[in-house]
Image: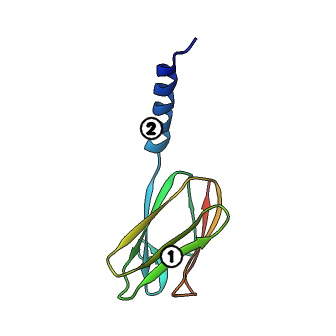
Amino acid sequence: MLSEKSIVSGLVMMFVSINASAADYTIMQNSKSFKVAGAQVEEMTIKAGDTIHFKNEDPFFHNIFSLSDLKTFDLGSYPVGESKSVVFDAAGEVEIECAIHPQMYLLLTVE
């Protein structure tokens, strides 16, 4: 029979191994669009547990948000040079937008 200590230890190891494989991505807000490595993106695929850092590279504020059932968030307005992060922990689709610039749209698929 397993002891409580060995069960907790096993759960901690499982959590660490799951999070160890998670990736970090940076999506820039530049020229009123979402960009990765300088290229504009409107669709992107990541894995569950991955983190996206939304970095503002424009001289004006952005307010990144999602009303998707899978992941609802509102990062609030933030200026050039600042970055805010979101962890996407479940599989599905997330529509990401900017409250200030309606042309900014990203469809994120989380696998």
Read off the residue under disc 1: 64
Measured from the top left, where is residue 50 in percent x and y?
50, 54
Secondary structure of the residue carrying tag 2 is: helix
What is the three-letter code of the residue carrying label 1? Answer: Ile
Q: Earlier in the sequence, mark 1 or mark 2?
A: 2
User: In this rendering, would 111 be left or right of 82?
Assistant: right
**Which residue: 46% across, 26% down?**
9
107 relative to 3, above or below:
below
When asked about the image quadrant of residue 30, the answer is bottom left
Measured from the top left, where is residue 98 in percent x and y?
53, 81
Q: Residue furthest front?
A: 4
**Which residue: 36% across, 81% down?**
79
Marker count (numbered) = 2
The disc placed on residue 16 is 2
Measured from the top left, where is residue 12 in percent x and y?
46, 32
What is the three-letter code of the residue carrying label 2? Answer: Val
